[in-house]
Image (cartoon, rainbow, N blue to C red):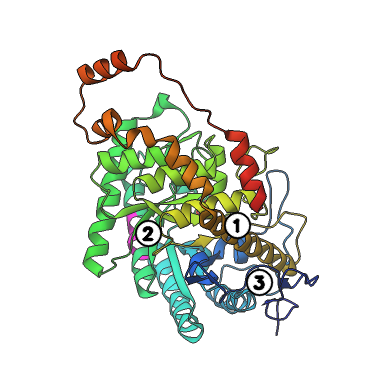
Amino acid sequence: MAHFPCEKIQYEGSSSKNPFAFKHYNPEEMVAGKSMKEHLRFAAPYWHVMRNVLADPFGGGTAQMPWDDGSDSVENALARVDVFFEFLDKMGIEYYCWHDRDIAPELNDLSASNAALDQVVAKLKQKQTETGVKLLWGTACLFAHPRYSQGAATSPDANIYAYAGAQVKKALESTKELDGLGYTFWGGREGYSTLLNTNMKRELDHLAAFLHMAVAHADKIGFDGPFYIEPKPREPSTHQYDSDSAACLNFLREYGLMDRFTLNIETNHATLAGHTMEHELTVAANAGKLGSIDANRGDTLIGWDTDQFPTDLYLTTQVMLVVLNTGGFTTGGLNFDAKRRRESHEPIDLIHAHVGGMDTFARGLKIAQAIREDGRLADFVQERYSSFDSNVGAKVESGSCTFEELEAHAMAHGEPSLASGRQEMLENLINEFI
Ligand code: XLS
Ligand code: NI
Ligand code: NI
């Protein structure tokens, strides 16, 4: 039985008026030597597609899920897997992501929960084999259960810390079992509400020890994919330790974790941190740590993580410019960590939402590549710094310059004349392509 009343979504081109067709995402179309699907590597998050009931702080869920009996049974969890794979097939999405507790229920104790997870993982494995779908990354939900209300790997309680470790151990083994390409840590409760009760130094030391144990266990079981840290500044905690790309990089460097970790950057988290997505991606890329992307967007009028689908061409163009400039994804991809609005409660709205997100990224990819081929933007930036290509500037960049030499240069050259930054001209240039 079909749960999403539409055919498989096909590419029909930009003149199509069919809401169940891609206007721009043409998976096999080549852009700069690679197919669109290889560039974009779309992934669907199990938690939003299958488990998000569309509640908000003022009201309960509205999502219609006729396939779901509402129970915490393993049977219900197994039934959802078929629906999810029907969804992936209709969308032509070849990657997915999960939290352990999205795919399988948390039962009375850890061993029962682990056994339930094993059953669902076995079914996911079979579906992956049948369809060729791949797991982009797995993760453990260390934020929903009340035991984690004061943190998991930063809990003040060693018993809870141990429980979290056991949960990550199992989630990592399940990721390995499904040939997952990566493993993500989003520190949902890893932060604090008040420093009055918090020993920040001990919590950060514990978090680092936790991540080192994860790496050691990955090595032990032969999981060699990257670990991602997903920055977010606040919500649910008042202050979260992984607040933005720069904070994460500093933490990873301080605790000797740079080798195995890279970043998974989410648009709405960037904006909550008071940055643009382009900024967060660029900070990561400069450190060689742009691993993967949670592709959503926020709402300028709402102050929380609204996890909306990307619809803004400027945003997707900026994202794809950074991605293309770094040479593209290797293990990562574009995971739509996005949910429908509470008012879009029918299953078919999931299809509309993803069609839009995929088309918006396809256009962003094509626009970004056109801007790169045109070359004027990159040429402008190169020219802007060209005084560092020779003479005193080149000496600075080689690390061999002294203040005496700068002084001699300044004395000899008199008052410098500074060129315009030409922001408006460049904004006009970008609009030529959008
Ligand atoms: C929540 C996060 C979460 C992570 C995975 O804001 O984005 O969904 O991506 O734990
Ligand atoms: Ni996310
Ligand atoms: Ni988020």
- x, y percentage for residue 54? 68, 56
Question: Local crowd at mark 3 within 10 Å, few (<14), some, or many (≥20)?
Answer: some
Q: Residue at x 61, y 56 (%)?
A: 338
> Dot 1 corresponds to which residue?
367
Q: CA distance from mark 1 to mark 2?
A: 43 Å
Q: Is residue 31 above or below residue 159?
A: below
Residue 243 visible in the displayed image = no
| SS state under label 2 | helix
Q: Is residue 369 left or right of residue 137?
A: right
Image height of 107 relative to 185, above or below: below
Mark 1 CB lies closer than 8 A to ligand 2: no
Q: Position of residue 321 (x, y in %)?
A: 51, 52
| Quadrant including the N terminus | bottom right
Residue 247 can be seen, yes or no: yes
Indicate the secondary structure of the residue bearing disc 3.
loop
Task: Indicate whether 79 appears above or below 401.
Answer: below
Q: Which numbered disc covers residue 68?
A: 3
Q: Residues within 10 Å of mark 1 (few under 14, many from 20)?
A: many
Question: Tag 1 or tag 3, which sits nearer the N-term?
Answer: 3
Residue 408 placement: quadrant: top left
Is residue 230 shown above or below 351?
above
- Kindly check if marks 1 and 2 are in contact, taking CB atoms under 8 A apart as contact: no
Q: Disc number at residue 167?
A: 2
Magenta residues (range): 165-170
**Category of crowding for the residue at label 2, using alpha-carbon neighbours closer than 10 angstroms: few (below 14), some (14–19), many (at least 20):** many
Q: CA distance from mark 3 to mark 1?
A: 40 Å
